[in-house]
Amino acid sequence: MPVQNAQFHINDLGLLRGYGLFDYCRTYYGRPFMRDLHLDRFHCSAMQMDLSLPMGKAELRAIMDELHQRANQPDLAFRLLLTGGYTDDGITPGTPNLAIMTENLPVVDETKFAKGIKIITAEHLREMPEVKSTNYMKVILLAKQMKAQGAADVLYHHQGELSELSRSNLFLFKKDTLITPHHNVLKGVTRRVVLELAADNFRIEQRPVYLTELAEADEVFTTGTTKKVMPIVQVDNQPVGRGRPGERTRFLLGLFDKLTQQAEVPSSAAMA
Amino acid sequence: MPVQNAQFHINDLGLLRGYGLFDYCRTYYGRPFMRDLHLDRFHCSAMQMDLSLPMGKAELRAIMDELHQRANQPDLAFRLLLTGGYTDDGITPGTPNLAIMTENLPVVDETKFAKGIKIITAEHLREMPEVKSTNYMKVILLAKQMKAQGAADVLYHHQGELSELSRSNLFLFKKDTLITPHHNVLKGVTRRVVLELAADNFRIEQRPVYLTELAEADEVFTTGTTKKVMPIVQVDNQPVGRGRPGERTRFLLGLFDKLTQQAEVPSSAAMA
């Protein structure tokens, strides 16, 4: 059905109490990309919020395929939303509500991959960061400030330790060492893919990363389903490295783009 | 319309991104209690989340009165919900969506006022605690633990400092001094009423309150729209004072009950 007709009653716990989680994946060249990893994470998020999915992975895949076919466009995004369901008393979860929707892919200015983006930083730690919950109050409140500063996103830190951007992961290069925070972050699917792609070419450190390390980094980039491998060239008022996308970042973006062109393969094979 | 027919589209920002706020008030003896204070706070919460209410206080009151009349029952609760509206891109607020609903009052076991309740503590700090946002992930996740421990609610603390319970405020008595945290809390309407009622009889301190002070308190209670003035007799495994509701708490509950019996008066007059 069209999204205009898809509705949840107003006593849904996602609406009343922000008790919901989601996942978001996309197609490349008409094929879902790393869909099984997204579905696995969707399942994990649900478990961590004590909610059970009303159907299994095969059924989810079948519905997504049918929606894809009906949408009659080669590439799109899928959003899967699960909430605490209709509540009787305003606080206790009922039977979870699930919605699966297709969306147009966001229009990404392709020159950004060549130019890189500017970001700001903010003190913040997501609640249960390893769960893809629907709580995005912080970044929505920061939207004005980001716009005023010409920033494309915000990087969160807490007591000096970096975690992640509002909807994507953080990577730093110090020479040929690729560094990424490994706790208090949502383990992104693109993050995982990039770590695998980088393994043959770089030394990798998954460890606590500190705000002070940004100034020492040669290259910084962020990974996400819509951002792919996006160079970051400025953090607040400080340029990163020489203030333009680095060659290692571009190399990883090239590998990533190549992977998206391949026919979909089981994620374990792609990852092997 | 019946709540079963009241629906928001699934691209509402309250559902997709937990970007929503609400207020909740009730009637006593068929009359709304402190409704203007609730409507003022609803307006303040909206402003702090950069959302504007689609109508003024007079119109909200008129709708609530009509719902009250149609509900055909003397006493009920009103829930007002405001979200970021339908979003085009999954993250940017649209025109806010407003829902006003009536609910049956929760069934409160009246013996609890005589016996007091047990609560647990948890390390947590609400995001923007002064805003009545819809983010209640923490307490919903703690529900099992509370049930297992026979606890009625949870008291949040952060780095040793107490803030509030999941949906109500905290008060301590040390002899005739009434103490309540004054920052990182939602300023409850019942909290305000109780502070006014207590002013003639007790010394009042609104200040940072520490976890360690619970053991020194003679009486502890919590205030909220459905809890009124509820004695707390046990925190985790520690009894409060002599482990039963204190006389000062009962005195304040008595004053509060008396106030609810009065005809509704403008809050400024009630508070004067």
Image (cartoon, coloured by chain):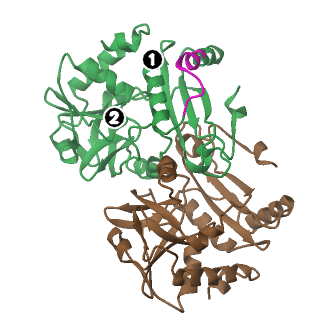
Chain colours: A brown, B green
Is residue B270 depicted above or below B25 in this figure?
A: above
Chain of the residue under label 2: B
Q: Position of residue B251 (x, y in %)?
A: 25, 19
Q: Which mark is residue B169?
A: 2
User: Counting residues from the N terminus, which is met first, the one under dot 1 or under dot 2?
Assistant: 1
Q: Residue at x 64, y 52 (%)?
A: B90
Q: Residue at x 55, y 32 (%)?
A: B52
Quarter of the image containing the C terminus of chain B?
top left
Relative to residue B161, is residue A154 drawn left or right? right
Is residue B255 depicted above or below A88 in this figure?
A: above
- Tag 1: amino acid: Phe
The quarter of the displayed image where residue A69 is located: bottom right
Q: Residue at x 70, y 67 (%)?
A: A26
Is residue B213 depicted above or below B76 in this figure?
A: below
Q: Is B54 covered by the magenta stretch?
A: yes
Q: Which mark is residue B246?
A: none
- The answer for how far apart the CA atoms under marks 1 and 2 are is 18 Å
Q: In this picture, which residue range is highlighted in magenta?
A: B52-62
Q: Which residue is mark 1?
A: B33
The quarter of the displayed image where residue A33 is located: bottom right
Nearer to us in this view, B51 or B40: B51
Assess disc 1: are there few (<14), some (14-19) or many (≥20) residues with their C-alpha within 10 Å of its C-alpha. Answer: many
Q: Is B221 covered by the magenta stretch?
A: no
